[in-house]
Image (tube, helix red, strand yellow):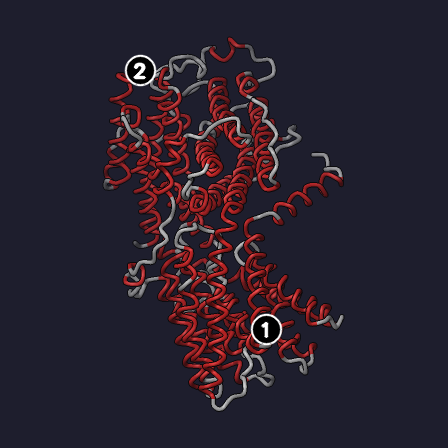
Amino acid sequence: MKPLLPPNASLSRRLRAALRVALSHYVANGLSVALGLMLISAGIHVFFGAAAASAASVGVIVTSPPDLPGPRRGKFWQMLPAPLLGLPLFFGVQLLQDDPVALGLLTVLAAFVSFLAMAWGKRGVPVAIALVFSAVFSMAVPTHEGRNALEAAWRTTSYFGLGSALYVVYSVLAHLALNGRYRVQLLADTLLALAALMRVQARHFGAARAPADAASADDAEGEPHVLGDLLARHAALADQLQSTRDVVLESPRTQRRQRLAGMLLLVLEMRDHLLACELDLDTLQSQPGHAHGLRQIQAVLREMAADIARLADALLMGRMPDPMTDRRARLAQVRWSPDEGDAAAFAPWQGPGPSPQLLARALADRMGHVNDEALRLVALARGEAEPNLAVVRASWQMFVSPTAWSLSPFLALWRWDAPPLRHALRAALAMGVGYTVSQALPWGTHPYWILLTIVVVLRGSLAQTLERRNARVAGTLLGCLLALSVLSFHLSPLSLIAVLTLAQAVAHAFAVRRYLLTAVAATVLGLVQSHMLNAGVSPSFALFERLADTLIGTGIAWAFSYVLPSWERGQIAGLVARTVSAQARHARLALGLGQLQAVDNSPELDWRLARREAYDSLSALVQATQRAIKEPRAVRPPIERLQRLQAHCYQLLAQLTAVKTMLLLRRGRLNADRIAGPLAQAADRIDALLLGAAAAAAAAPGSPPASPEAAPGPEPLPDPFANDLNPWLLRRLDLAVLLAGQLRGEADQVKQRTGR
């Protein structure tokens, strides 16, 4: 039985996690947004009064969703669409406050138009939310007295526009000021994601034990879901890497920026080497007595994960990271069993393929590459090494996402099966029903609460909607209790403004990371602001209204997630085709010798771009499969086959990474004339298998074995630490071709099962 951690260790771990959150980029971003809200609202309150300040604060809240850490270039254009398009929506709602029918029609139309922005993907989501907020929050602004409705609407909208315009200017300046800090925080977040991946991979080394050994192993960790966790961690890291690339690789002109960019590129190399460490693992775990060697490698990997996490903590706290221990010599001494001698590793092996002793030493060698990159990473962070400036300068323009808005997503939207179009129709219908219900309720003093709940709960997929539904209900209940506690103290207006500022910071910071906290903070924000604007209303009744409206809104959003659904099944075939195509292109470039023979870095950049697309496409497929698990069984795609396809994709990437590592790092131990032909042949066969017809897979010489790791090598394999690596490279090529055939077969079966 595994010993329990001492209480102080658990407390220290929780404090460390809390400190990482407090120093994160999303908390810094939330505090920046809250500071902007406070400064703009307070300034307008001083010059124009409380009514103007309340309208201006709505303008700030509506404009703030797109204000997220990102590249400096294009920040203004990222912020502009929300206030520019939200201003006429706000004015229209203000003008139609006394006409419920016209207001309802405008609300439905606004929801439809706003959610069309989802066509721009991650960049469009906050803009869509901001546009709907402009219409919904306009209902919350009290109608001011004036000569007529037009004059009142115009004056209120002017203050809304003033708050929005001031916040756009503030956000651009604040983003410039925080850019340096964002670079460090995003890199630290990526390092923590890498450390999490390393810990899960360490668990994988002990996940499948031989029956005779499993009973006696005290620390057996044979959870069947470890492979799924590993795939999910790889997908999460790929997603995090793109966000970090956009900031860290942008304009690396100063020495500090170049060092951070160089560290990020080393993280990419470490991910590749970690992936290669999955090779031969199934074969090793199937052999009796495998635990001793794998435990040694597992311990080293866990120690390196802890070093990477400590490096991230040092970056967040702005201190010099501690030096890292070199574990190369320790890995070179890994043995299959405690009493294994050097001669045992090369004794005649009667089974298929190389002996377990050789595979264990090869695995230790690949883990040594992880150790080497980690040492370079820490040395670079400590200023003891210099980044590869040629790669850094050539990479940043290639790997940073475009910031310009294009009409292409909008023009491609108008087909019936387009998910953004169906979601816009679904959201418009849900908003229409929500508005009708809000008008029929006996209280009806805050009809926008139901609409606001629908906006934030109804997502593009059922899995995301269910997650938001649960978090919204729980968060509203907790927020109501917290708001009641705050209001019971009868705080001064200044103290209530401080509460609002803190609530806005939390609501914005955790909107993507942990929506439960956002729901709590948004509830406090709404109730306290409502109390300040309508001091005569009973707080207890407002709490009851908020909770009841939330339950109604979440129920409507949940129901409409089944209306015009965009099931993941309809997207899977396209994602699989993208993944297979990306794997084929990556294989072609990874197996080429152009990078070794070129006089510039163009071949390397092409390979890096292909590698990124291979990871990103596979990450999108993994995430879609995870969402599909929450969908009704009748419409689910073939989950098990998709998971096998994903596993084969990662195994193929691992084999190609191992080959690429030999070509780049061990070129002196390879005979170029001897390997040029096999490399070209393997690239052609993989290309034919992945991009050709299904018949090409069947025609490939040699049928894939049940386990590609058990395939025999072309000749007896030498010690992986020896000089001659040609046999190992040829074995990797054979296994890569076999995996390509399996991958093609899985892709064809998924296509048949999804009817695409």
Q: Residue furthest bottom?
A: 147
Tag 2 secondary structure:
loop
Residue at (40%, 46%) from the top-left corner?
Answer: 642
- Position of residue 357 measured from the top left corner of the image (x, y, whole percent): 50, 17
Within 10 angstroms of label 1, few (less than 14), some, or many (20 or more) residues?
some
- Judging depth in this view, the residue of 634 and 454 nearest the camera is 454
Please identify, in this view, whether the residue under mark 2 or under mark 1 is nearer the observer.
Answer: 1
Q: Secondary structure at mark 1?
A: helix
The quadrant the N terminus occupies is top right
Disc 2 to disc 1, C-alpha distance: 76 Å
**Residue 596 coordinates in the image, percent (x, y):** 30, 24
* Viewer can see residue 625: no
Residue ID for mark 1: 45
Q: Amino acid at mark 1?
A: His
Circle 2 residues within 10 Å: few <14, some 14–19, many ≥20: few
The residue labelled by disc 2 is 671
State the image coordinates of residue 504 (x, y, percent, origin top left): 59, 63
State the quadrant of the C terminus: bottom left
Q: Which one is in front, 612 or 434?
A: 612
Residue 716 located left or right of residue 335: left
